[in-house]
Image (tube, rainbow, N blue to C red):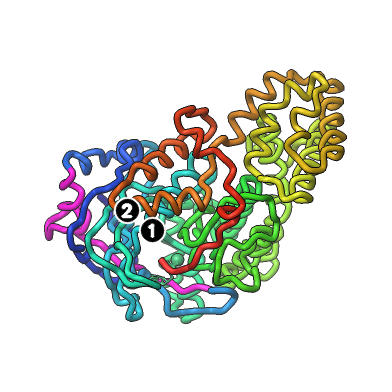
Amino acid sequence: MYHHYATQLAAICIEVKPFPVFGPKLAVKNLALAESLNLAHLFDTDHTLLEALFSPTGELQIKSVAQKYGGHQFGQWNPHLGDGRGLLLGEVKNNQQQLIDLHLKGAGPTPYSRHADGRAVLRSTIREYLASEALHHLGIPSSRALALITSNEPIVREQREKGAMMIRTCPSHIRFGHFEYFYHANMTKELDALFEFCLEHHFTEASGHVNPHLALLTEIARSTAVLVAKWQAYGFNHGVMNTDNMSIHGITFDFGPYAFLDDFIPQYICNKSDHAGRYAFNQQPSIALWNLNALAHAFSNKLTMGEIKEALRLFEPTFIAAYRNEMLNRFGFEITSGELQSHNDSSLDALNALSTRFVKLLSDEFADYHQSFRLLSNSISNIQDGDYQSISQHFHEKASFERWAKDLSQHLRTHVIDSELMQQKMLTKNPKYVLRNHLMQQAIAKANNDDFSMVDALITVTKSPFDEHPELSHLARVPSEKDKGIAISCSS
Ligand code: AMP
Ligand code: MG
């Protein structure tokens, strides 16, 4: 274990030990992730991990710290944030020799708890565990989940609930709000130390640049644009894009009332408290840019206004190119991110136009976003053969879908595209299984009665969402009307 953050940035964090819970039990473990982090020994017995966390000599609590940060919440600056219920346990190296943070969520009170209990409910830890794994296996950058620990300790939210803890991993827990806090507090020395820390450990390429701070801001803008493009392409609504929930690594971070869309409603709001729709699905790209702008203020002693604009100006073209790229991938074309801007192929432009029309048709009739893509993937050969009904029969606007399918068929013939190969590729890009909110609610209800079977089943399908898993096909069904589009409360 390394403790680079705790030692090099001791001035901006506080040592706090995990506060044991009553009746802890290792309920879910991610062995594959543990192996990739050389931490499989933590799962030797059901007690090994708990001892490592809670015994005074445990390897995971030698130098655990709470980090200080701030954040713009729903557009308002809040300097009073920090790890109020989470602790950075330390860093380890993964198989690729990259540093990875281990963080315990629900660890108990810290000086940043602001009179709250420092705990997390079982419901929200299950949701975070599942979503981070689901996104990762869809190819969307995310923090990961190493283990979930249940407890017998009741927690009071809107009602009494079970408490739990989870260990999450990611390159670092440094948020936009870290930089914002030390900038707005005029803590220049601390802000500089944070910049140096990031350049030394996490952005080594930028550190070798003639202007490392410009390279750093540019890289954060780039990775954030690519991340949000993936959210938009895969119908993921984060729900609380406050700047304290934005990772500098361009990964999905801090899960709250998120949702994968059911019906394709671009203005969908998954967060019950977001009355104005600030974080609605279709607002995510512009909010990401707003957040980058808030972050960029912290660079203003290091960069000229021209340089800051230069970095932020990259966001929009990068987002547009990345989104187009993702959608073309969903239509069976493999384009690596390196090729993003260089593609100037008229057949891809035509396919891109077809993809845009398809998405528009889905939004016109609020069709199920994910099932429509899976259905299309399974229908390509039929469409090639002139059978347009195989797809149109699933939609209300049959004539529109048939017109569109006919144009796709024409496209396949004109560009001599092997429909079987296209179908195969599409089936590896358009998931059969999607982590929908109503499924999680059922899994959580069972887990609250100590039955983790549905959590386990959801883990199985989210680990390989493109595979058929015939025995679990009921988890791929479209929700009933009452189960669609569930908005979630922020309490966690
Ligand atoms: P979140 O909603 O989890 O992103 O948290 C927002 C802020 O509130 C962070 O600074 C958290 O550390 C803090 N926080 C949230 N829930 C709790 C809790 N139960 N106890 C202490 N701090 C909390
Ligand atoms: Mg947060």
The earlier-in-sequence mark between 1 and 2 is 1
Front-most of residues 215 and 379: 379
Q: What residue type is labelled 1?
A: Arg
Which mark is on residue 155?
A: none
Q: Residue 231's x, y, as percent?
A: 60, 50
Q: Give the range drawn in magenta.
A: 46-72
Which structural element holds mark 1?
A: helix
Mark 1 against mark 2, which lies toward the viewer?
1
Residue 35 appears in the picture as rendered = yes
Q: Is mark 2 within 8 Å of ligand 1?
A: no
Q: How crowded is mark 1: few (under 14 residues within 10 Å), some or many (20 or more)?
A: many
Q: Which amino acid does label 2 sit on?
A: Ile
Judged from the image, the quadrant occupied by ligand 1 is bottom left
Front-most of residues 382 and 179: 382
Q: Does the magenta stretch include residue 58?
A: yes
Residue at (83% x, 22% y) in the render: 386
Disc 1 to disc 2, how far (Cα)? Answer: 15 Å
Circle 2 residue: 167
Front-most of residues 30 and 211: 30
Q: Residue 286's x, y, as percent?
A: 68, 63
Residue at (59% x, 75% y) in the render: 75
Circle 1 residue: 123
Front-most of residues 58 and 217: 58
Q: How crowded is mark 2: few (under 14 residues within 10 Å), some or many (20 or more)?
A: many
